[in-house]
Amino acid sequence: MASADTQENDSTANSLPSSSFIGSNIQAKFDNTRAEAFAGKMLDILNGGTVSLMISIGHQTRLFDVMSKLLPSTSEEIAQSANLNERYVREWLGAMVTANIVEYDPTKQKYHLPAEHAAFLTRAAGLNNIAVFTQYIALMGEVEQKIIECFHKGGGVPYSAYPRFQELQAEETARIFDARLLDSILPLVDGLEDRLKSGIDVLDVGCGRGRAINTMARAYPKSSFVGYDISTEGIESARHEAIEWNLTNVKFEIKDTTTINEHEKYDLITAFDTIHDQAQPSKVLKEIYNALRKDSGVFLMQDIAASSHLHENMNNPLAPTLYTFSTMHCMTVSLAYNGEGLGTVWGKQKAEQKLGEAGFSHPIEVKQIEDDILNYYYIARK
C-alpha cells in the first residue's frame, strides 16, 4: 500500500494511483485531471479494440450489407435476412448499439443502421468501407504470443503464420485497383497511358493475387505483363483470374524478387505496397533498377504515406495503426528471414534514400491522389 506522504488525500488515493506508482525519482505533483483524462482514453481504446472485432464479424457475415437495405427490424428479422443464428446476431447487435453504430428502439425492439453509418461499413461504400480493415485486428491477434516471444528473443514471425493475409490483402487491394488504378494511379506518370496503349513490357513485383496486373492487362491488350510473387497461393489465384478474364498477354511466376536477374527487359515496373515488406528491400530495388530499360524505364512504387521521423507522424491520423501493423506484421515478417526490417512506417526520406542507393539518379517524384491519405506514389526513372 502506498505511504501517506505520497498521497494528496484519502479520497484521491482511493480513486486514482499516487505518484509512487510512477516512480520514486519523479518529484512532480501528481496531476489528477490528467490521470482521469488518460483513464478515459484507455477505456475508449479498450472499447475500440473490442468493437473492432465485432465490426470485422459484421463485415464478414455481411450483416452491415443486409441491415443497410432493411427498415428498422427485430433481431429475428435481421438474422433471417442474413441467414444467421439469431442468438449470435442479437448479442452482436448489443455491441453495435452500445457502440453507437446501430440505432435501437427499445419499445419496438427494433434495430436500424443509419445510412450515414452504412456509408463507411458496407461493400457498397467502395473505397469508403473502413470495416474491411478491422479484419486485420483479428489476424494480428492470432500471432500476439509469437510477437511477444520476439520481444524477448528477437527474430520475427514468418509469413506462413498469417494464413488469411493473402485473402485480406486481395479483398482490400482489389477494390482500390478497380476504382483507382486506371483512372488515378497510372495517369500519375506522364505519358504512361499512351505507351501502354501502344505496347510496352511491364512487370509487377510482389503481385499477390494479381489484381493490379490483370486489370492492366485487360485494359491494354497490346502490352505484355508479368507478375512475380513468392506466394504459391497468390500466384495460383492470379493465374485463375487471368484465365477467367480470358487474358493472353499476362503470365505469373513464383519468384524470389531478390533474384529477378533480368537485364533491361521492362519499360515499366510496379510495386504496390510491397517493398517495405521485403526481407531485403535494397536488393529488390537494385534488381528492379537493373531490369528497367535504359532511358525509357519507369518504376512506379506505391507505399505508405509517412515520414521516416517519428515526430513528423504525430499528426498522421493513421499513425498508431501503421506502427501497430508494422510491429505485428510488416517488420516482423522481414526480420523472420534475417531481413532489414524496414517496417510499415519506413517513410518518405528512407524510401528516397533506398531508391537513390539502387541507382535511380534522376529526381524522384512523390505524388498523392486526392482522398488517399494512406499512400505515396514514387516515380523513379532510369
Image (cartoon, helix red, strand yellow):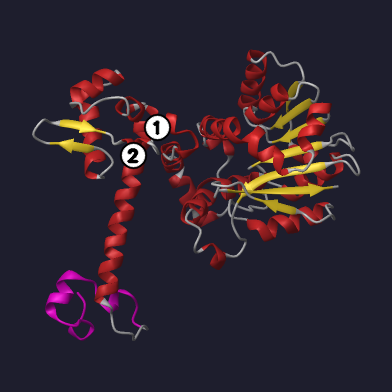
Q: Is residue 324 above or below residue 193?
A: below
Quadrant of res 125: top left
In this view of the protein, which residue sits in the foreground, 19 or 117?
Answer: 117
Residue 15, given in percent of the width and then of the height, sits at 17, 70
For the image shown, how many numbered marks are present on the structure? 2
Please tell me which residue is depicted at 23% across the width and 83% down the height of the picture. Answer: 6
Give the secondary structure at mark 1.
loop
Question: Mark 1 or mark 2, which is nearer the start of the sequence?
Answer: 2
Please tell me which residue is depicted at 63% across the width and 49% down the height of the picture. Answer: 368
In this view of the protein, which residue sits in the foreground, 141 or 223?
Answer: 223
- Residue to which mark 1 is pinned: 122
Quadrant of res 210: top right
Give the left or right position of residue 382, taking residue 215 as reference.
Answer: right
Give the secondary structure at mark 2.
helix
Residue 333, given in percent of the width and then of the height, sits at 59, 44
* Residue 178 is at least partly visible in this image: yes
Give the left or right position of residue 66, taking residue 300 as reference.
Answer: left
Q: Are marks 2 and 1 in contact (CB under 8 Å)?
A: no
Q: Is residue 175 above or below residue 371?
A: above
Please tell me which residue is depicted at 75% across the width and 43% down the height of the picture. Answer: 189
Residue 323, given in percent of the width and then of the height, sits at 51, 54
Question: At label 1, which amino acid type do we have?
Answer: Thr
Q: Is residue 16 magenta?
A: yes
Q: Is residue 21 magenta?
A: yes
Give the left or right position of residue 356, taking residue 169 as reference.
Answer: right
Question: At label 2, which amino acid type do we have?
Answer: His
Residue 369, given in percent of the width and then of the height, sits at 61, 46
Q: Quadrant of the N terminus?
A: bottom left
Q: Which residues are magenta?
A: 1-24
- Residue to which mark 2 is pinned: 117
Please tell me which residue is depicted at 21% across the width and 21% down the height of the picture. Answer: 77
